[in-house]
Structures are given as structure tokens and as C-alpha cells.
Image (cartoon, rainbow, N blue to C red):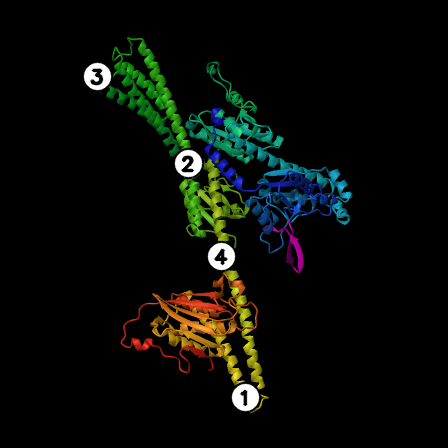
Amino acid sequence: MADMQRPDPDALIAQLRAQEEQTTRGKLRIYFGANAGVGKTWAMLSAAQRERGAGRDVLIGVVETHGRAETAALLAGLDALPLKEVEYRGRLLLEFDLDAALARKPAILLVDELAHSNVQGSRHAKRWQDVQELLAAGIDVWTALNVQHLESLNGTVGAITGIRVHETVPDTVLDDADEVVLVDATPDELISRLSAGKVYVPQQAERAAQSFFRKGNLIALREIALRRTAEHVEDDVLGWRIEQSGTPGERVSAAWNTSGSILACVGPNEDAAQTVRAAARLAGQLNVKWHAAYVETPRLQRLDAPQRDRILAVLQLAQELGAETAVLTGDHVAPALAAQALHLNCATLVLGRPAQRRWWQKWPSTREVGREIAGLAPSLDIVETARAGSSRRLPQALWSHKVGVEARETDEAAHPRWQGFLWALGASIAVTLMATLLHGVLELTNIVMLYLVGVVGVAMRFGRVPAAMAALLNVLAFDFFFVSPRLSFAVSDVQYVVTFAVMLGVGLLVGQLTAGLRFAAGVSNSRERRAQSLFELARELSAALETSQVIEIGAAAVQGHFGGRAVVVALDASDRLHYPDDLPQEFDKSVADWTLRQGQSAGLATSTLAAQAWRYVPLKAPMRVRGVLALEPAHPRWLLIPEQAQQLDTLARQIAIALERVHYVHIAQKAVVDMESERLRNALLGAVSHDVRTPLTALITLAESLKGLPTEEHDAVAQAIVHQAHQLNALVSNLLDMARLESDVSGQSVHLRRDWQSVEEVVGASIRAAKPALKELTVRTEIPAHLPLVEFDPVLIERVLVNLLENAAKYGAPPVFIKAFATEGSLVLTVTDHGPGLPPSVRGKEHLLFEKFTRGQAESATPGVGLGLAICKAVVHAHGGTISAASATGGGAEFTITLPRREPPPDPDLEDMERGVAAPGYDANTYRAGG
């Protein structure tokens, strides 16, 4: 019983993690009822009033009274959070304000109508998702839910009532709730409340009484609600027992007959199948869960292949009959079964009736397994089943394709036992020869120690039986060769009889313990291997970004654990299985398609198409089946061991989750690309339609007006036409420049024509080019006379300055300053205006101004498509520089360009070039467009 009470280290770690999460996460209480009108909101508000009276901070997030006066009266004195107004299709709707609740952060928050769907555009589509965020923030939430809103019961309730509810909540929300308070009312009471107008208004009440609130519906819904609540309470009981099993001083040593679960004990006897069938019938009659378990002990581990096949066949039968199966390990059967029954909180154990023994087999110390379990777990009911005349065996056809392998495995299993006996004999002879050589040096007690070392070595390598044989041979050899009279089994001193007995007993005990440790180490290695396979697969899949990577990693992991061959087949874009080109010849596509459609395993070691050489497992992800995993294992018997079958299912689920993650990553990336493309398309169409239409309309109007105008006015109209054509040309130039620069990003390189340039010349050229936009706007320059030459593309940098000047002309105010100065390793150019400065919407996010189709004002009469600054950014980045925007100190906007600079090459005329040449017609420091 001490082993049964020893805390599980993994369980303790999980408990500590759960406790850590509970300290930061809020608690969820759900007031659960069969249908509307049972009083869930009333009960919730009543409890809230009691908590308020106890001094706790209670806040109403949203509560629906449905016009019930009794419920509305309970709102008095409780603080309520104002509802948020949300516009939807021209109407103002009131919704729960999640952000205000998070900012307020009360101790208890009341959020009614858990299944409510939020208005489109809210942060979460469903209110239960709002509740999850509130819980994560550490806020305790109380809410209400009807049984028809549970996702798994939605169809069942719809079939009973004829009304399908579209607002549902995942079952996990109810399962994970910290508290479920059942609010119940009898059908007659509900009908009376409905007639009295306490559930709905009279018009709604009349319709409800004729449809949903019929007595038969209410009885059925009440039963479903009671059962669902009982399942949650059962989980709470099991969780508490598991938690307390690792808490000192709170050990739970007895099963509690709260669920009536049954545990069938599968043994190696012929009538094990009868035990499973009897347990299945009993569970069906009682309508309870049932389990089946087989205990692998060191003695049972040495069973021959037919007996092991019979055990696996019985476990398979139990799975087909609906049991949860498990293979346990332990030195003895009874403690392992008792511990499993207590862990699962089973109330009844079903055992096979023990065989009748002959009188010489009834040793006084022998106890039946049932009696041992009764002593270990007195609270368990134990049922013995009748013996059967036949037993269940595996179909021979199931393993026909592996007969050669199984035969070799049987031969290999038989060989080590004879080899162990030979090694036991050899070890005894070797120790005897060594002791003979050392006989004059060592005392007889030390020679006994040498024999014990030989027993330990045989036990570690070959198990109990060879170790027992070695112990017996060692006693005989010690007596014959070393005890006086030597070379005889006669004993001169009676005390040596005690030595022989102790030596034999210690040898047998050491062999038993060593073999037990060897068995436990083998079990631990097997568990570690399964855990390591899952860990390695999860680690590899976490880095997979493509479906092909997931397929390759998943197939390699399954094949590495089970041996043989494994194939992972994922879905294509049309939701069909996409088979690889190197598909094995034995792979059956029709079975894989059936597995995908039905979502069930098929093939080897299943009840469907069991003659197949492959096992086909559906890749079930949380949302849907994502493909099929096919396995041809090296050892088919493994798939009948519950732990190995569960391992295969777990590996398949990990692969499915990774496929679904990659799928949704691709969808998210595509959605982002589509959204960005749509945004750019809309921006381009809006800008072009706005800014191209204006000059085109002006051109058409001016051209048509030429017919009726006198000749002397043609020149003015022609100039206006030219002006509008220049504006249209500038717009098209910006579009073409942006397209050319974007093509550089896509791989079509645009070469920069770098050359050593005078900054003053480029500034003057840019001012002349911006003359149509600047008009009478004053531009002042501050450029040092000895500013060195800088290497850049003059045409593109001129375009950058022109765009910045046009931007200042559109949004700024005179005067405009252009400054240039050199630092070590860089050239800095600034363009500053004295206008209103950067828009408030981009302050702190100035980099957004350089995005394509971004304008200073979303809607204005100022022409432009928002490409000028984007072109500036692209050009400057192509030169390896940076560009930034900021509000100027004295008002206005300031754009700063930083270009990398290196020392120019030596030139005899460098001093003359550095003096600079002022642009013709302009003052060296002040330029006036048109002046």
C-alpha cells in the first residue's frame, strides 16, 4: 500500500504548475440551467449582493433582466459598467465594454449571456472570448449559460425541441470552469412562471409555450443539464483526488463510489475474454464508464508468443467494446490493480474466477489476487466472472504477412533462456577456477563473496531463473571443492550447513532483486523512449514552416519509433489527399481515403480492413482532419499494446496540429498580402481618379473652349493647357518612378549612376525643376562654400529634393530653407518649411509618411497621390542613406536626408569646383521662383 500512496513526481510538477497559473488567473463561475427562466441571472445577482455585503468589489459588466421585475430589483446597490455604443448597419447597439472592465479590474465581474455574439468589428467575435481575456487578467467572472448553448449538445437539443440555437459555446469553457452552479426548476414550475409572465413578455410567452416550453422538452432538457453538471462534478472529484494524492497528510486511500466506474482485470488465463465481456455487460446495464487493465510482471513478461497474443487480443476486444485500456507494470499484480482502481476512482473490479487447484497446489502462504486486492482496497466491490470454455485469439491472417519475422522473434526469445543457463554454468565454473587458484590466499568467507558476485552478474544479464540456477551451482561447487572433506559433498562441520543455506538464500535474494531492478529499468527505458519520441517530434515540428517539412519530420519520427515504413499524406488545396510520387507499392489509397472521410483508424490491428499490412491513422487537428498517417511497423504486435497505440495516436495528433498551424500561417500571410494589395489598389484608384480627373477635365474644357475664343486669347488658354499637362505629367512621372523603384526591389535591378557632384549645383537644379509648384514661394539655402563633393546619382537626388519642395509648397508656408553640411562620413540635407507642421495623426509615427499613398490629409483639395515621400525614401535607401521627418522647432515640418560620404579623389581643380557655381539668375543664398 505504500507504493500506492507514493506521490507521482510528474503529477507533483503538474500540480505546482497548475497552482502557479491559478494564482494569476481569475476564477470562472457559471450559473448553469436547462433553459431560460430557471433563475440563473436571479441567483447570480443574489450571490453578488451577498458578496457586496461582505465587502468585496463587485461590478456588473452586463446583465440581461428581460423585463423581469424581481431580477431588476436585485441590481440596486451594485456598481454597473456603462455599456459601449457600437454602430452597426446604421443603428447604435449597446455592447459590453471589455476595455473599461480591464481598466476597472474589479474583484468580481458579472457578465451575463455567455453565448452572446458580439457586434461585428468587436475585438472578439463571442462574449466567452471576452471572458477568457478577463480571466487571464486576473478578474473573477460570474456568468450564466443554458444547456442548449453548449456546442456538443446543440444538435441534440435541436432534435428534441425542433429549434436550432446558433449562438454556442465550446464545451471546454464549461469543463474548465472553476465552479458550476446548477440552477434547476421543475417543468411544472417553469410552465407556471411562463404563464405568469415571469419568463417572457406575453406575446413571446404564448409562442414559447407552443414550441420550446412544452413539458416533454423541459423534462428532456432538465435531464441533459443534470447529467452535464454531474460530469463536471465527477471531473472535480477525480481532479481533487489526484491533487490530494500528492499532498502529505491528505492521502486518499479508498475509492469513492460516486461514478460507479468498473475496472476489468485482464489476466493470462484462457477465460480473460469472458471477464471483459462480463464487465462490458455490467457497464452497459449500469450505464457507467469502464476500463480494462493488464499487469505486466517479470514472470508474465516471460510468457511465450501465443499467450502474449491472447492477452493482446483480449485488450483489443475491450477497446472494441468501449473500454479504456492500459498495460501496467509492477512486481505484483494486486498492488498495481488496486492502485489503478483508486486512481480511476472505480467502484467495482471484475476478475476472472481462479482455477481449481489440486490439494498439493494449495500452499498455506498462497493468497488469491482478489483477496490481496480486498486487503489493499477494502472499499472496492469485487466481482468474479464464470469460467469460459473458449478464449479469444488473434486472427492468423492478421500476421500472415509477418510470419517470417514473428518466427525469428520467437527463436530469438527462446535462445536467451538457454544461453542464460549456459552462462550460469560457465560463471560457476569460472569462479570455481579463480577461487581454486586463490584458495591458499583467501578465506572461505571471501570465496563465498566471489560466488555471490557471479550470481549478481548472471541476474543482471539473464534474469531470475538463470540466477537461481547459478546460486544452486555455486553452493554445490563451494561444498565439493572447498569445504572439508574436499572433492566430496560430505560436510565435517555442521555449521557449514548454515553457510550453505545462507549462501543459497542470499544468492536467490540478490538474483531476485537484481532481476527486478532490470525489469524496472526496462519499463523506465520504454517510457523514456516514448516521451523522448514525443519531445523530439514537438521540437522539430516547432521549427517547421512548410507542409513538406512537417510531412518529412512526422514520417521520420514515426518510423524512428516503430521501425518499418511510415508515410504522411497531407491535403492539397482542394481538400484531397496529395500522394507523394515515391508511394510504397503496398500502400492502399482507397483505405487512406476511407480513413480521411470517416476520421477513424483502419487497417492493421483495427476492426476495419484488418487484413491490411499498413495501419492508417487520421491526422485529427482541433479544427478538422488534415491528412492520413500510414505505418507498416517492424513489429505488428506493438500496435495491440495500448500504450503503443496511444503513442501512435499522439504522434499523429502532433503532426496534425503542426499541419494545421502551417496551414493557418499560410492563410494569415495570404490574408495580409491580400489586404495590403487591396489597400494599395484602393489608394491608387482613389488617388488617380481624384488627381487625374482634375487636369483631364481642365484640359478637355480648355480644348473645347478654343473653338469659341478669339485668336488673341488662344495664348493664355494654351498656357493653361500646358500647365495642366505639366501637372498630369508630374503625376504620371511619380507613378512611373515608384514602379521603377519597386521593380528594383523585385529583382529587376536599377543601377545608380553615381558620380562626384557639387551639392550646390544639384540644389539649384532642383529649385529650377520645382518652379511650377513653387510659383512665388521663397526658397533660401544655407550651403557652406567649401562643402566637399559627394558621390551620388544627381538625377535621383534632384528628384528627391523636387518632391520635398513640392511637398513644402502644398502643405507648408514660406520661407522654405534648404541646408546642407558635412559630417565625418555623411552628408546631411534638410528641407524646412514654416507651415502648420506634421499632422497630429502621424506624430510619434512619422515613418508612416513615407508609405505609399499616404497623404498629409486624408481628404483635401490639395492634388497628389501620396507617392512623393515614398519615392524619396526609396531613392535615399538605394543610396544607403536615411530620411526622416519631424516638426521644426519654430513651427513647420523638417525633412532630413543623410547620405553616406567618403573623401573625394584628389583633383588639381578641386578648389575651383568646391567654390560652387550659383545657378544662373539666382542669388547664391536666396532663390525666388519666377524672380
**Residue 299, numbered label:** none
For marks 1 and 4 on the same chain, the one whose residue lies earlier in the sequence:
4
Q: CA distance from mark 1 to mark 2?
A: 94 Å
For marks 2 and 3 on the same chain, the one whose residue lies earlier in the sequence:
3
Q: Secondary structure at mark 3?
A: loop
For marks 1 and 2 on the same chain, the one whose residue lies earlier in the sequence:
2
Give the number of the mark in front: 1 or 3. 1
Number of residues whose C-alpha sits closer than 10 Å to that of mark 4, classed few (under 14), some (14–19) or many (20 or more): few
Q: Secondary structure at mark 1?
A: helix
In the image, 451 versus 53, the foreground residue is 53
Give the number of the mark in front: 1 or 4. 1
Q: CA distance from mark 4 to mark 3?
A: 85 Å
Q: Secondary structure at mark 2?
A: helix
**Residue 714, numbered label:** 1
Residue 33: where, in percent of width, then height? 67, 40
Q: CA distance from mark 2 to mark 3?
A: 49 Å
In the image, 189 versus 617, the foreground residue is 189
